[in-house]
Each structure stands twice: as structure tokens, then as C-alpha cells.
Image (cartoon, coloured by chain):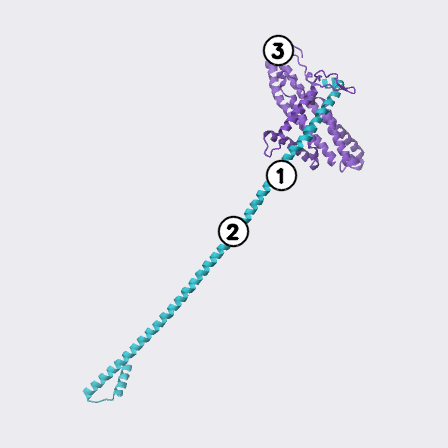
Amino acid sequence: MAAEGKVDPMHQFTIQPLFGSDGWNIAGYNVAFTNSSLWMAIAAVLLLVFVAGGAKRQLVPGRWQMAVETFTGFVDGMLAANVGPNGKKYVPYIFSLFMFILFANFLGLLPIGVLGLHPFTFTSHFTATGVLSILSFSIVIIVGFAKHKLHFFSLFVPHGTPALMIPAIFVVELISFLVRPFSLGLRLFVAMMAGHVLLEVLSSFVISSGNANLGLFAIAGLPSFILMIGICALELLVAGIQAYVFALLTCVYLNDAENLH
Amino acid sequence: MPQIAQLAATYSSQIFWLLIFFGFTFFAVGRGMVPKVMDTVAQRDKQIADDLLAAERARKQADEEEDAWRQRENANRAQAQALIAEARSKAAAATEERLAAAQVLIDSKLAEAENRIAEARNSAAAEIEDVAADATRDIVSRVAGLSLDDSAVRSAVKENLVHG
């Protein structure tokens, strides 16, 4: 960031190796511990602390336990509604997925910039969201073939398809199925990145106009600042919704694998 | 766009650390703690359901007992009513019997009294006859100087007394 107040809205997504770990590698692949890795670690540890605080197993729950039970109940209900009784066994995975993304999204929005720290949203990187979506997609494929063997291919031929249409429909359905991991990962990455860029761009308006003169600040800076407040609230909503959408779509795909159509 | 600009340099690190930390989250939190939390919830739900069932059972039992009590109470009341009715009819019968006995007594007393009255009237009539016969004989002897037979006088008097 230049001294005269120019803000690069993409700078916040830059990955930097920390603690001189630049050279770490395994079999020639770089595994530097970056700021992205650090925030993954923070999300994982905070999630561990959160759930551990709620695992007190009291008959009459306290507030913390109640909060954790609300989340497990939410995930349990989502699986029960989308997959049915067979979905119970996926609760640990969907819960981890949902909460990990939720914590990552919220941590990335923390206003700790005022303390000179730099929050990093690793869910705004498709290298991270892609791993999660491929993980979900792999589970769907493995469960589907393990449970239904080659009959799993009937997923691509909906009930009541005329015989003549089967080849065409099969190809269309296969493509839509194979696109799923990309749409799943890209959706989260795009939503998180767009919000952060928007906030950064608006903040650059506030800073530039404030540095220029009072009149410009009044007509451009102040409205931008007010807009930012609204968009911050919207971003909090998006952070929750995107985590929910990711978990929900994984449930829907798991339903295909568990129950076919 | 750093996501693409840094792709070649950072993808392996991103994938590696994400798998590490998501794996940690999955095994420590998802597999380790979530089942316990869910188990606690299930236990609580089960306890609540059991308590509700017990309460329902107790309520049913109370209803049954109340029902039995009501039946017993009704039977007792009917029994008491029967006792009262019996006593009342017995008392009525006794009263009637005593009344009948008193009536009989009164009737007999009445008949006795009537007999006595008739007797007294008869004896009075006889005395009048005697007195009349004596008077007739005296009158006849004094007026006509006749000494009449007693029975003839008596029959004549009787005839006159009867026919006026």
C-alpha cells in the first residue's frame, strides 16, 4: 500500500510465507506455512475450543452447550431432511465442513485491521475451497459406487425418460454431475472474494476522498462509508449463507449417492 | 488477482495445510466431539420422552382410580338409598298395621256401645210396659172396679204401645 493512500483491493488475498518457512517442501512440493495456513489453523483451533466447551454432557445445558447443540442439531436436521435416516453417519463430516467454512468466513471479516493485524479469508482462494469441494465430491462418488455398484449410473437417467432420449439425457446429466465440484468450490470462493473486494474498494474511496479535500469526502467518502456499514452486515449474512449452501449442497449430492433418484 | 498469480507457487502449500487442518477438525471435532454432543442430546430427549410417558401413565392410573372411587361411591349411595326406602316402607307398613288394629278396637268398642244402648233401650221399653200395665190395671180396678188378669192387661198395653 502506497503512502499516499492508494489501496490495492487485491492485496488482501496475497499469500505470504510466515516464520521463514518459504523453503519448506515435501518431495519437491512447497509446503510453506503461509498466512493462509495460519488462519486455517486459527479456524480449526477456535472450532475445537468452541465444540469442546459445549461437550460438557450436562443434562441441563448451559448457554455454551446449548449453542453447540444448536449447531449439531441444525446439521443433523439438514441431513435428516435431505438424505433421510441414512444421513446420520455423515453428521461428523458435514458438521466439520459447515463449521470450518463458517469460522473461516467470519474470521476473515473480523475488524482486527484496526489493531494492525491482517485477517485472511482462506475461503476466498479456490485452492482451498476446491480441496473441500473435491473432498465432498469424492465422498459422493465413493459412497455411490460402493452402495449401488454400476447401478449408480442410473442416476444420470431420470425416471420416465423416453428410450430415444436416454443417450442425450445421459450425457447432459453426466456433465451436470461432473460440473458439481467446480460450481461448489467456485461459488464459495467467488462470494467471499467479491464481498472483500467490494469492502476494500469502498474503503479506498473513503481514504482517497478524505485525503483530497472535505467537499469530496462529503459527497463521495461519507456515502461510501455508510454503504460499507450496510455491506459489512450483508457480508456477515453471506458468510453464514455460503457455509450453509456448501453444506446443504453436499447433503443434496450425498442424497443422490445414498438413495439415487 | 493473487489467487491466480500465485497459483503455481502456493497451490501445494494451500492443499497440504488445508488437508492437515480440515483433517484435524474432522477427526478431533467431527469424529471426536460431535458424537458425544449428539449423544447427550439424544439422552436428554429420551429422558424427556420417558418422563412424559411416566407422567401420562400416572395420569391414566389416577383417572382409573378416580373412576373406581366414583363407581364405589355410586354403589354406596344406591345402597344407602335402598336402605332408606326399605326403612320408609317398613315404617309405613307398621303404621298401617297399628292403624288397622286401632280401627278394629274402635269398631269393637263402637259395636259394644251400640249393643249396650240397644239393651238399655229394650230394658227401658220393658220397664215402661211394666209401669204402663200396672198403671192401666190400677186405673181399671179403680174406675171400673174390675180385677183384670195381669197377662191380658199386659198384652193390651203392648198392643197400644206398639200401635200408638
Which residue sits at x=52%, y=53%?
A: B72
The subunit carrying tag 1 is: B
Q: What is the display colour for chain B?
A: cyan
Q: Amino acid at mark 1?
A: Lys
Q: Which quarter of the picture shows residue B126?
A: bottom left
Could you say whether the residue bearing mark 2 is in a helix, strand or loop? Answer: helix
Q: Is residue B69 visible?
A: yes
Q: What is the display colour for chain A?
A: purple
Q: Quadrant of the N terminus of chain B?
A: top right
**Residue nearest the observer in this picture, B133 or A138:** A138
Number of residues whose C-alpha sits closer than 10 Å to that of mark 2, classed few (under 14), some (14–19) or many (20 or more): few
The subunit carrying tag 3 is: A
Disc 1 from disc 2: Cα separation: 36 Å
**Residue indicated by mark 2:** B70
| Residue A208 in the image: above or below residue B150 | above
Disc 3 from disc 1: Cα separation: 64 Å
**Residue indicated by mark 1:** B46
Could you say whether the residue bearing mark 3 is in a helix, strand or loop? Answer: helix
Q: Which quarter of the picture shows residue A199?
A: top right
**Residue indicated by mark 3:** A211
Which residue sits at x=74%, y=23%?
A: B16
The answer to whether mark 3 and mark 1 are in CB contact below 8 A is no
Q: Amino acid at mark 2?
A: Arg
Disc 2 from disc 3: Cα separation: 91 Å
